[in-house]
Image (cartoon, coloured by chain):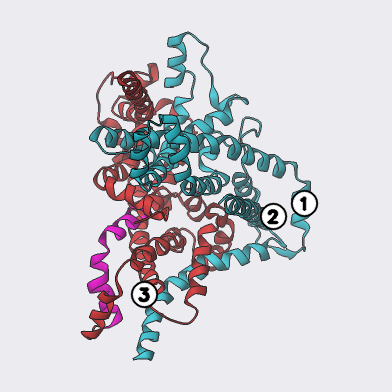
Chain colours: A red, B cyan
Amino acid sequence: MKVKNISITVLLIVLAVVWILPIYWMFVMSITPNELLKLNSTALWPQGFSIQNFLGVLQIGLTLRWFLNSIIVTLLGTALTLVLQSMAAYAFAKMRFKGRSLLFSLTLAGLMVPKEAMFIPLFLMFAQVGGHNTYAALYLPRVAIPMGVFIMAQFFKGVPDSVTEAAQIDGATPLRTFFCIILPMSIPALTSVGIFTYILTWNDFLWPLVAATRKEMFTITTGLASLQGNFAQATELGSLMARGVIAGLPLFILFLIFQRHLIRGISMSSGEKY
Amino acid sequence: MRSRINLSVLYFVLPFMVVYFIFQIFPLFQAVVASLYKWDLLTSSMSFIGIDNYLKMFKDPTFWSSLMNTIKFVVYSTPLLIGTGLLFALLLNGTGSKKVLFRTAFFAPYIFSVAIVTLIWGFMFNAQKGLLGEFARIIGIQPINWLTDPSFAMPAIIIATLWWTVGFNMVLFLAGLQDIDSALYESSSLEGASWFQDFRYITLPGLARTLELVTILQVIMSFQIFGQVYILTKGGPGGTTRVLIQYIYETGFRDHQLGYASAMAFALFLVMGVVSFFQFKLSKEES
């Protein structure tokens, strides 16, 4: 028994090292001067230390602009998703109206639509109204993906009817009930949906690649991709890795803070339980 | 009273529904319409050609090879992603700060964007500059240039994808494991059941629903593979890694044939619809 436990632990440590090592390696290269990396890029301990790679991000190229674009798009997209989708979910879960189950099924059917295959039709639509290279083009299609409606409706179904009835008897309007009573109760579920939307929007690749063709409107994800595969990468490995670290940092911090919510969020969206 | 409630339903449902119809439902119809046109992105010239785009697709060898590469990726990566995810979940089920730490390590890559994953792995797979090449030199074998070698490019894509996304499956399995009644394990240990018997008769049946869900999600995700391939290999070497979404993208935005690209996108919808339908049917029959 003891031997088995030890061998499992050793296996886990090896696997964890394999999983973390590539991330660590990116970080090591990002703080190593470009000239040293030209000679040797496989050192696991930094051969030199320099923050020049990071300073370069601020001075050269559009990385900072892409970073800001990503923040704007992601924040707007996440906020709109949370408000619109939780309101719709509340109506589906707690209100009675004609066509409710039809609309709800239609919404859930959207979960089956392969997101990445949508880029051609979406492109055609934005092309017709000349909406390319705008922030709205970058975040609106994400708001339409109904994952949050599904998760929030599951949550709202678990809220006892007595809560909403009591508010109604007190004369609160449905909107007031929702914003002042229901939403504050739903912060854990909202957090999960919010973090997920944030991550997926920040990491979106194919749609921003199509929707933003002007370099100034790239997100950090498409921008970083555009820097790969050209000649500069061979000579400026450290700068490239610094851009990678910067692109990943906001989510990495978010992940460390909200780890618990994130993991619970996934289990909720699996529909297993709350 | 009644009318007020109905009106408020509008406030609640309408804003999302408008966005949903415009950006999710309507484009689907538009794709079908566009697929019936010869539509040039550069000149914006459109002419109705009926089902010619679909006929062209059936005769297009690149379409078929891209579809086959996609299917190859799905077939090889799905069992690996599910098996490894399940293994991690089984090893890390339960509480304890060590387990939480390991879970964090395996889940961490999932939060990175595809551009970061390819940034890291593009160099990992490089024989001269990467850690894999260095490792090969240390153990005394010839380093491989994974991404430019036709027989190693697809495995490289699969390895990078495994590293990137397996944490998500692990977490789904962990959630599934928590739903299994712990009393079952207690009674089986009283009866002296082995670890394997526990796994075979309690864990696996208890996970049936999760396994189904993970499989369906994974197949849907894998069919949509694009970014890793597009950035790491551009579909090369010699088209051995070109996947369907990439071919649709190239047709639309490199060759400017939006009508043909729409036809292939619609074909992809259909293929995935059929695959999901059979998966659902299969899982219904099992239970």
Crowdedness near tag 1: few (<14), some (14–19) or many (≥20) residues, C-alpha within 10 Å:
few
Q: Is residue A184 magenta?
A: yes
Q: Residue farthest to the front?
A: B191
Above or below, B64 relative to A232: below
Q: Which mark is residue B260?
A: 2
Residue at horizontal 38%, vertical 16%?
A39
| Residue B218 can be seen, yes or no | yes
Of marks 2 and 3, the one in the foreground: 3
**Residue under numbered circle 3:** A94
Magenta residues, dominant SS class: helix
Q: Which residues are magenta?
A: A173-197
Above or below, A11 relative to B193: above
Chain for disc number 1: B
Residue at horizontal 55%, vertical 52%?
B287
Q: Nearer the viewer, residue A161 or B236?
A: A161
Tell me the SS state at disc 2: helix
Task: Give amino acid for label 2.
Answer: Tyr
Evaluate if marks 2 and 3 touch, with contact meaning CB atoms under 8 Å apart.
Answer: no
Q: Quadrant of residue A85?
A: bottom left
Crowdedness near tag 3: few (<14), some (14–19) or many (≥20) residues, C-alpha within 10 Å:
some
Chain for disc number 2: B
Evaluate if marks 1 and 2 touch, with contact meaning CB atoms under 8 Å apart.
Answer: yes
Q: Which mark is residue B56?
A: 1
